[in-house]
């Protein structure tokens, strides 16, 4: 489809030279056309946003630019005046990426990861100069204002810290200029304050002359930071325009082809008189400091807090997957169990880092979904493939996963559909409690609302749900009660009408300043 410029949105200035030029880009997989005749220009010194619902083709386009996918014949990509073939893209230093999966070695430290992306500093005898290497790492991270032990393995770092390291690695040894930095969902799991700080860094990179192709599902930040935006739908460009005059609702409508509600509220009744299904006592960890909580049947309980408050640790501690956690948990009327043994209870968790901690990339959609219930799918000593197929089909339909089928590789699904599979994996275990961490990170507005509605419907059926999220929108959409953490302790409880955007932000910021 031809790129359009509405009357109220200016096209690129005549005679300006695109630093990145894409023409007639198509990519076909067996039985699927992921991209069809896509045209896209990124101007010099521009922040150009790329948006679209899950499955619109954004990820495929980024993978073509990165050299992971080979485009169909007839596709053209130019960097400046230089044509880029598929084989040449990977070696081109003027095109750099920060992908959703970050590409970090979590077993290694920030020092090692940054050195692997540039070089190790060595002496004349070839010995690594670790003091200089550490100093260089601290210098690269200085502008990001992140508190990180640069010598500790990144497996111990938070998603925020890992994102910062990945961005620093992409910029390492590159002063900008005539090049393009591709940022794919860099703020997906960042809380508002950290996301705002990152947007400032993105502007600074742009102001030095570097062009940026910026992919995000957060429509408000697209409008705030981008100069122009290209919208993909079904693998085609439906519109390219400046962000002037846009708001999240109008941009969401262009993406979906009709209006998408951006202010969904579940409007669940209070559940505090319902039986307590899950209780935690004296929960402690790296940041947690003696938290007590009760979760009621049919309740969606939110947990909020700034980075380092302990909010991100709470659900993993309850699930028994936080190694350093101590305390006790009780499921229903069952026995009190140390959190070190809580993994034996049926407390499924959807972790905040879906790609690192949940998705099994070498497996199919069906295998990812059914792995938690294999014992129920046996006939005698063998797995019943018929029963597995039926269960997978039922759950894919239940949570509305869009995929070629249960045999499709999980990596072919969009982020939103992968997240639905992770939630279905937990629900298939028929739990009384579901633990959700950043449930809509990296998810487009339509899939985001679908997840909110799905979770709310489960609560109406009696499921007790704990939601921890750096995205206040998740808490506003679903929760009837929110605990606010600071310095590892519960310092505020917001109920019903108290749960507003202003109320949550004020509660988190005020408690942090005490």
Image: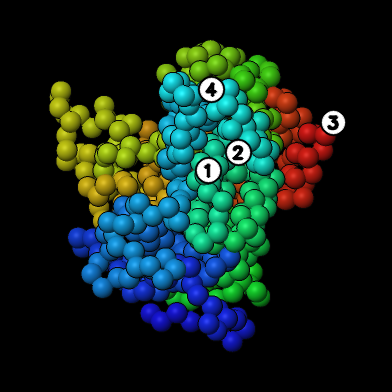
Q: Position of residue 282 (x, y in %)?
A: 65, 16
Residue that carries the numbered disc 1 in the rendered image: 172
What residue is drawn where x is 53% and y is 82%? Answer: 15
Disc with the residue nearer the chain's start (1 vs 2): 2
Residue that carries the numbered disc 2 in the rendered image: 140
Disc with the residue nearer the chain's start (1 vs 3): 1
How far apart in space, not on screen, are marks 3 and 4 (Cα)? 39 Å
Q: Indicate the quadrant where residue 389 lies.
A: top left
Residue reaching furthest to the right: 514
Residue that carries the numbered disc 3 in the rendered image: 514
Viewed as shown, does residue 1 lie left or right of 132?
left
Local packing at callout 3 (Cα closer than 10 Å; few below 14, some 14-19, many 20+) is few
- Mark number, residue 163: none
How far apart in space, not on screen, are marks 2 and 4 (Cα)? 15 Å
What residue is drawn where x is 55% and y is 59%? Answer: 177
Quadrant location of the C terminus? top right
How far apart in space, not on screen, are marks 3 and 2 (Cα)? 31 Å
* Residue 232 visible in the shown view: no
Local packing at callout 2 (Cα closer than 10 Å; few below 14, some 14-19, many 20+) is some
Q: Position of residue 16 (x, y in %)?
A: 54, 78
Disc with the residue nearer the chain's start (1 vs 4): 4
In the rendered view, would you say 253 is above or below 162?
Answer: below
Q: Secondary structure at mark 2?
A: helix
Residue that carries the numbered disc 4 in the rendered image: 130
Viewed as shown, does residue 289 lie left or right of 387?
right
């Amino acid at each position: 489809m031809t790129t359009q410029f509405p009357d109220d949105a200016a096209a690129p200035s005549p005679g300006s030279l695109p630093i990145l030029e894409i023409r007639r880009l198509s990519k076909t997989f067996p039985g699927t056309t992921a991209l069809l005749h896509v045209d896209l220009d990124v101007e010099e010194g521009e922040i150009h946003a790329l948006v679209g619902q899950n499955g619109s083709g954004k990820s495929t386009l980024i993978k073509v630019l990165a050299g992971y996918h080979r485009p169909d014949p007839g596709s053209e990509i130019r960097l400046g005046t230089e044509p880029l073939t598929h084989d040449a893209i990977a070696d081109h230093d003027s095109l750099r990426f920060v992908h959703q999966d970050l590409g970090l070695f979590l077993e290694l430290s920030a020092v090692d990861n940054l050195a692997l992306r540039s070089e190790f500093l060595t002496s004349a005898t070839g010995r690594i100069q670790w003091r200089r290497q550490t100093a260089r790492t601290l210098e690269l991270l200085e502008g990001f204002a992140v508190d990180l032990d640069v010598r500790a393995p990144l497996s111990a770092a938070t998603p925020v810290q890992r994102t910062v390291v990945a961005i620093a690695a992409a910029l390492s040894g590159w002063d900008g200029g005539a090049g393009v930095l591709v940022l794919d969902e860099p703020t997906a799991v960042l809380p508002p304050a950290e996301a705002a700080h990152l947007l400032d860094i993105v502007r600074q990179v742009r102001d030095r002359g570097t062009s940026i192709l910026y992919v995000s599902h957060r429509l408000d930040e697209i409008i705030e930071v981008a100069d122009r935006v290209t919208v993909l739908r079904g693998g085609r460009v439906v519109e390219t325009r400046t962000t002037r005059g846009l708001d999240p609702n109008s941009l969401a409508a262009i993406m979906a082809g009709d209006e998408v509600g951006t202010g969904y509220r579940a409007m669940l009744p209070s559940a505090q008189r319902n039986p307590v299904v899950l209780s935690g006592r004296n929960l402690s960890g790296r940041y947690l400091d003696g938290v007590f909580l009760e979760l009621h049947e049919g309740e969606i309980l939110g947990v909020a807090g700034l980075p380092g408050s302990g909010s991100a640790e709470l659900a993993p501690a309850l699930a028994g997957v936080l190694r350093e956690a101590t305390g006790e948990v009780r499921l229903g009327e069952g026995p009190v169990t140390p959190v070190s043994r809580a993994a034996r209870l049926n407390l499924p968790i959807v972790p905040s880092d879906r790609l690192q901690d949940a998705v099994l990339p070498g497996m199919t959609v069906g295998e990812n979904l059914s792995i938690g219930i294999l014992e129920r799918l046996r006939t005698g000593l063998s797995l019943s493939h018929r029963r597995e197929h039926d269960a997978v089909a039922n759950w894919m339909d239940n949570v509305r996963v869009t995929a070629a089928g249960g045999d499709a590789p999980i990596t072919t699904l969009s982020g939103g559909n992968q997240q639905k599979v992770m939630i279905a994996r937990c629900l298939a275990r028929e739990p009384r409690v579901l633990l959700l961490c950043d449930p809509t990170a990296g998810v487009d507005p339509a899939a985001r609302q679908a997840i909110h509605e799905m979770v709310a419907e489960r609560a109406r059926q009696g499921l007790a749900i704990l939601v921890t999220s750096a995205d206040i929108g998740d808490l506003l959409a679903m929760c009837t009660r929110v605990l606010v953490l600071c310095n590892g302790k519960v310092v505020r409880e917001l109920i019903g009408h108290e749960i507003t955007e202003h109320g949550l932000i004020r509660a988190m910021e005020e408690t942090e300043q005490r």
